[in-house]
Amino acid sequence: MKNLTDQQKGSLLAFVAVMFITPDSLFIRLSNLDTWGLVFYRGIIPFFTVFFIMLLIYKLNFFKILFNSGFHGIIYITTFSITNITFVVSIQNTNVANTLVMIATAPMLSAILGAIFLKEPPDRKTLISIIITFFAIVYIFFDSLKVGNFYGDVLGFITAFGLAIGAITIRSAKTKNLVPAAVIGKLFVASFALFFIESFVLKDTDLFIVPLMSILCVAIPFVLVTIAPRFIPAAEVNLFFLLETIVGPIWVWVIIKEQPSIETLQGGAIIITTIAIHSFLKLRKN
């Protein structure tokens, strides 16, 4: 990593994170837990996993880093907690493709917020990519409206907005390590779920699926996604999340036959092509 440019580091971290995230929607569908049971375990397992690793690395400096994050840390804990909850509840109340399409608006929101608060207007390549993917999202969204899962779709959009605010927060605090704040955010998620959870029992396939999902699709990606905006603009980080818009539904389609519409596949192909070209041009420039 030391030999890579900031652009290469940020792009690599964001890409690897999203690749880990792509089967997340499938695992949520395969789990037999109620919504708040899922939220609880997706909070508590990553919390203990990353907290233990960070204590090994930083020892008691973990708490020093946490407190030094200050106002940025508070904002990130809040947005991180909200998005972790709204994502699961959205998946449980609409089609996977719908939720991921809503989340795909995050780059556009990041670009807007970045231009307003960080004085980082997106460059022409990023702006063109955002415009193209936005129209692809609109194309998919008009089809998803036919399903009528308004509640789940709104929560998906709230998740996207939270991701955008979180990425902007990290970008504005490039000198600070906000991973400890994300860890505390996970504890907040689990604590909030305690008020609504119906059962803590993991049985049958959940004994395997829930821990695997919580580590592979939640713990590892949230660390990488928290670091990536320190190297590249928030809008570029969130562009990589558009990969989940098409890859996530494909996982669900292949395994449990929840088939995405032809509009989702067509729009997804445009999104993937746009991200690939954008990333290639940005990396070649560096």
Image (cartoon, rainbow, N blue to C red):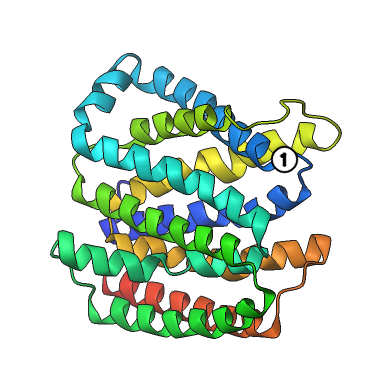
Residue 254 in view here? yes
Q: Residue furthest left?
A: 119
Q: Residue at x 41, y 18 (%)?
A: 55
Residue 7: x, y in percent? Answer: 29, 61
Q: Give whichever of 166, 175 is nearer the camera.
A: 166
Q: Is residue 3 left or right of residue 12?
A: left
Q: Name the residue tied to disc 1.
A: 34
- Above or below for 224 versus 43: below
Residue 16: x, y in percent? Answer: 50, 54
Residue 274: x, y in percent? Answer: 45, 80
- Above or below for 118 versus 266: above
Quarter the C terminus occupies = bottom left
- Above or below for 6 versus 180: below
Q: Residue at x 37, y 60 (%)?
A: 237
Name the quadrant containing residue 278: bottom left
Q: Is residue 153 left or right of residue 72?
A: right
Residue 219: x, y in percent? Answer: 53, 38
Q: Secondary structure at mark 1?
A: loop
Q: Give whichever of 183, 1 is nearer the camera.
A: 183
- Above or below for 77 versus 275: above
